[in-house]
Image (spheres, rainbow, N blue to C red):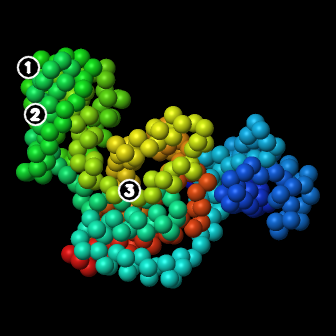
């Protein structure tokens, strides 16, 4: 099988350099970038030549032209190429590193350490910071039972990690009989007892998408009734989120409905948990740009995450969320070094 060609190798060096300059300038001021503003930025090229290069980059899908301006802005693909191949990361300030170490070392327990890490990263980046608490992605299901309440409401009783009991009242799209609910809970206990909540959520989502035509009535009932409860399970305790107010700068504030949806997502935490669950499966930094997250709500956002460990095992994730024009060159090393410090402090306290 032939080796995949590195996309940056398909670009002339001049085009790569101009794309890098344009992305950096757009990140800095948030405005569409025209050819004239790039001339003089170390380019011994005429505006006409730069315009031709920009037109080629647009044709390749790395740039787009907003309707209201002659300038151009990066697409998701342009940001991805910039992050993967053109980015020059900044050095993290030594004083900032010491500040992080001091703040985390003074915390008394794992949750306090996570809260300190989330707060200080938000302050340093001026973005929304999220920390998935140690071990929260490892919660396992022992038992699940469904009890019919009034019309189209079901009480879901979850037993997690051997002894923790959670009750969730969920609304359903139809009435379910006691027999249906009992069969559904038996199906889930037989197939998922002892497995991680995050793994069950992912499996149920996959079944809904790929096996719908082959589902039995019991399977369909089990998925529809359990999915809401599993999404809510420990969601309030799993994450520490700081700096939500920074989201105000992400969306055009004239789009109030979209801004409201964004705040609701951070309040309910379900979509964030699903995304960080994916991040916790990798021992590398993860960067989702726009639609790469797979969630339409985050199509104008970027997320940068890094795992942290206890011993050799990944136990949580630290992440920041912001606009696609996030200052990657500064934020990536900040997230990376803070996750490593968080890792170190947790290991020293255990």
Residue, disc 1: 179
Instruction: Tell me: 232 left or right of 330.
Output: left
Q: Secondary structure at mark 1?
A: helix
Instruction: Residue 36: give x, y in percent of width and height.
Output: 87, 55
Closest to the camera, between mark 3 and mark 1, is: 3
| Relative to 139, residue 314 above or below | below
Label 1: few (<14), some or many (≥20) within 10 Å?
few
Q: Residue at x 9, y 31 (%)?
A: 186
Q: Residue at x 10, y 45 (%)?
A: 165
Mark 3 / mark 1, whichever is N-terminal: 1
Mark 3 / mark 2, whichever is N-terminal: 2
Instruction: Tell me: 300 left or right of 163.
Output: right
Instruction: Tell me: 253 left or right of 349.
Output: right
| Relative to 16, residue 207 above or below | above
User: Is residue 320 visible to the viewer in this orientation of the structure?
Assistant: yes
Q: Secondary structure at mark 2?
A: strand
Q: Nearer the viewer, residue 111 or 204?
A: 111
Residue, disc 3: 241
Residue, disc 2: 145
Q: Nearer the viewer, residue 223 or 61?
A: 223
User: Is residue 219 visible to the viewer in this orientation of the structure?
Assistant: no
Closest to the camera, between mark 3 and mark 2, is: 3
């Amino acid at each position: 099988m032939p080796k995949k060609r590195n996309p940056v190798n398909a670009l002339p060096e001049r085009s790569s350099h101009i794309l890098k300059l344009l992305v950096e300038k757009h990140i800095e001021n948030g405005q569409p970038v025209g050819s004239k503003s790039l001339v003089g930025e170390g380019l011994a090229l005429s505006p006409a030549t730069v315009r031709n290069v920009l037109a080629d980059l647009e044709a390749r899908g790395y740039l787009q032209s907003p309707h209201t301006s002659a300038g151009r802005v990066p697409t998701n693909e342009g940001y991805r190429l910039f992050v993967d191949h053109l980015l020059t990361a900044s050095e993290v300030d030594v004083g900032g590193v010491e500040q992080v170490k001091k703040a985390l070392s003074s915390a008394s327990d794992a949750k306090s350490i996570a809260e300190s890490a989330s707060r200080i990263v938000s302050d340093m980046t001026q973005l929304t910071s999220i920390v998935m608490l140690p071990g929260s992605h490892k919660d396992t299901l022992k038992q699940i039972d469904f009890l019919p309440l009034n019309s189209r409401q079901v009480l879901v009783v979850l037993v997690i990690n051997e002894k923790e009991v959670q009750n969730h009242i969920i609304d359903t799209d139809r009435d379910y009989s006691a027999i249906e609910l009992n069969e559904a809970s038996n199906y889930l206990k037989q197939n998922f007892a002892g497995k991680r909540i995050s793994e069950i959520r992912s499996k149920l989502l996959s079944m809904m998408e790929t096996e719908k035509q082959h589902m039995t009535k019991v399977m369909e009932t089990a998925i529809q009734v359990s999915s809401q409860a599993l999404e809510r399970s420990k969601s309030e305790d799993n994450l520490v989120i700081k700096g939500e107010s920074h989201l105000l700068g992400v969306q055009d504030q004239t789009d109030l409905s979209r801004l409201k949806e964004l705040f609701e997502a951070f309040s309910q935490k379900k979509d964030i948990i699903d995304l960080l669950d994916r991040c916790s499966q990798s021992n590398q930094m993860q960067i989702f740009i726009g639609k790469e997250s797979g969630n339409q709500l985050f199509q104008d956002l970027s997320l940068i995450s890094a795992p942290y460990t206890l011993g050799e095992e990944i136990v949580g994730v630290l992440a920041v969320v912001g606009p696609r024009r996030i200052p990657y060159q500064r934020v990536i090393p900040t997230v990376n070094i803070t996750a490593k410090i968080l890792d170190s402090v947790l290991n020293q306290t255990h």
